Amino acid sequence: MSISWQASDGHAHHILDVVSRGADGATSDFVISSWTRCVNQYGLDPARPRSPDILEAAMFRERVERSGDLVQCSRLEMATLYQQLSEPEAAVVLVDADGLILHMVSSPQFARDGAAIGFRKGALWSEDQVGTNGMGTCLVARAPLAIRQDEHFFAPYTELTCAAVPVFDHTGKFAAVLDVTSTSRHHQQHSLALLSITAQTIENRLIERGHKDAYPIHFHVRPEFVNSPNGGKLVVGEDGRICAANRAALSLLGVSSVEALCGRRLDEVFHATLDELLRASVESSFHPVPVMRVNAPNPVHAVAQRPASRVQARAIQRGVEPTPVARGAVGGMGPIGAGLGAGMAAGGYPAAPARDAGNGAPVHVGALSSLQSAASAQAQVAGAEVARVATGRTVVDYGEPRLASQRQVARRAIARGIPVLLHGETGAGKEVFARAIHEDSPCSHGPLVAINCASLPETLIESELFGYSTGAFTGAQRGGRRGRIVQANGGTLFLDEIGDMPLALQARLLRVLDERMVTPLGGEDSIRVEFQLVSASHRHLPDLVRRGLFREDLYYRLCGVEVVLPPLRDRADKAELVRRLLALEGAELRLTPDAEALVLRHPWPGNVRQLRHVLRTAAALSEDGLIGPEHMPTLGMAPPSMTGMPAAPTGPMRGMYGDAGREAHGGDLRDPSMHEAMMRIPSGYVPDDAQRQLSPRDELLRALELHRWNISAVAKHLDISRNTLYRRMRNAGIPLQAEPEA
């Protein structure tokens, strides 16, 4: 980049000509308006360039301190945006409401070149100081805009292209401008899109910082967008009155300003009180729940969470460092309580890393669901030890030829450092197979680092994978934190459910895989890493690629060798696996012939994970060590067509769900005689139509029709969250608003 301080008579003449004559057909109206203000209102002359005023150091520090939380809430987001842009000849800039550059992220070379024309921290870039420019003109327009090279008022700035968006504080007041300035000649529409997302995230963080003792509520008409930057956000006080709202919330609620919304009770906006919405959120494991808006025919999906101050206080009481609050940036689940990150126990507290009993290397277990406890985390690690024998090596089969063959293929691939992609149903043993691959690899002396991409909020995935530097955000650990990729250096990185990784992060992951360099959030220095990559998914990635939900280049980078794990129902070693699992529970445990027949013919939709759970339960129920069908009640339950029929919501919560919660399920199923008939169904009974292998889409349609398209009932029937159901419907191409056929 070469930026010089020079004047151009031709450029000045063109500006004055346009100002005097009006529109020229080539210059946008807002640029002409800015040029006109510069000449007529500010008295600037395009032929006499001016450099921006620079504040003295002491005065600049005072202005930064006076900005309050603005800079603190912006640092991490700006560093993340700069990394996403991947453009060395660019800078991400934050200016206050007066045009003062408060913070800037750029390469050292760009900073040195920019300083020559006053493009540096402490400089005033308001429109009345330096004419038309992205930052200053956005301050006037208070709307997103781009100023390309010759559109700048002064010639020395015509090598720059700027994109800028406004930022509003937690009271809805105009607070700052976020800008990307580069020497690129390309149109900055992509920069504007990324800037808008980043600005919304900063605004959400400002709301969080300004109302730590209030209850955050996230909502959207689509459940998958609830915790995205485009999702609405309210904060509500203990008295149930709204304290603040972001711009998305105003739009979703049809309100013109924050002032018009603040002070109103939550039940004046939604058909639910704060207590009711909190209770529903807890019961749904903090997945979005439907709630009706006042004076609106359609519901939104919302989740309420506890105040950040309470979560941090509980963390301090337990003597652990508070983990960073999940940012609503770059798409993702949002702040506190929306989900738990990798290595976190229930309640938002970090869980101690598990340790591999076989070789002593740390095993960092991936993200836990929001209802898992520390004990559940230990159980997950124990599940990976199911097939560990006395030698300390992981066994993936007990006579299943396909698994033995696939392990041999994987062993040859990893010997050459080729990435391995595992594909199999949920619970089929992908993590156990990944452990076996790690033990077979040249990296077996290093750690196995596992992370579940489906269970982490999107913004937590970013910090977990890439880490963060000192001071990246409020509450960050002193000295920063290494990301999972750096932790896997010299070992194996296992990315489970890679098909659920957000598109925004797939580009960063691809870059790391290509360059083997990691840059922590908020940092500028990159770290070189070497690791064996193993990925896994139960979803068909080529189909996701065709539908634009997964990057094609990343798929080819991950899929050096694809290993398909058979489901438990198709495994030839099922009987031996059952005996091995029983041996883990107690030396004297054994199955009766009827129980063994029941286990072997069961379809096991949850695969090995379900099998282990059933056997552990049976072992606990058996008093003499002999396990019969009566000790495995879940295998003898009535078929799906006769179960999972929840009652419609009643009491004060009924209004939250509107008509969706008032679907009739057929009263005859609650009749005592029907229950008696169900009790007479023989153990292990499976209806003829259930014996046929249904596609996932057919299974979904069958459940939807069974429950008359009542989403809540279907989710309960399938034992999944509403979010997961919506995602499966979308992946299967089933319209969300579809109605049952007459």
Image (cartoon, rainbow, N blue to C red):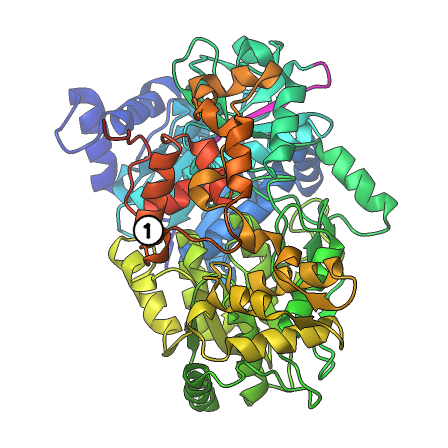
Residue at the image position 39 percent from the left and 53 percent from the top: 503
Residue type, mark 1 in image: Asp
Image height check: is 269 above or below 605? above
Residue 269 vs residue 730, the one in the foreground? 730
Is residue 232 rendered magenta in the image? yes
Q: Looking at the image, can residue 288 be seen?
A: no
> In the rendered image, which residue does mark 1 sit on?
689
- What are the residue bounds of the magenta stretch? 231-239
Q: Is residue 374 left or right of residue 99?
A: right
Q: Please tell me in which quadrant of the rendered image residue 572 appears.
A: bottom left
At label 1, counting other C-alpha atoms closer than 10 Å, the crowd grade (few under 14, some 14-19, many 20 or more) is few
Q: Where is residue 448 in the image (x, y as percent from the top left)?
A: 61, 75
**Secondary structure type for disc 1:** helix
Q: Is residue 632 left or right of residue 548?
A: right
Q: Position of residue 167 (x, y in %)?
A: 50, 30
Image height check: is 122 above or below 432? above
Q: Please tell me in which quadrant of the rendered image residue 121 appears.
A: top right
Residue 712 vs residue 580, the one in the foreground? 580
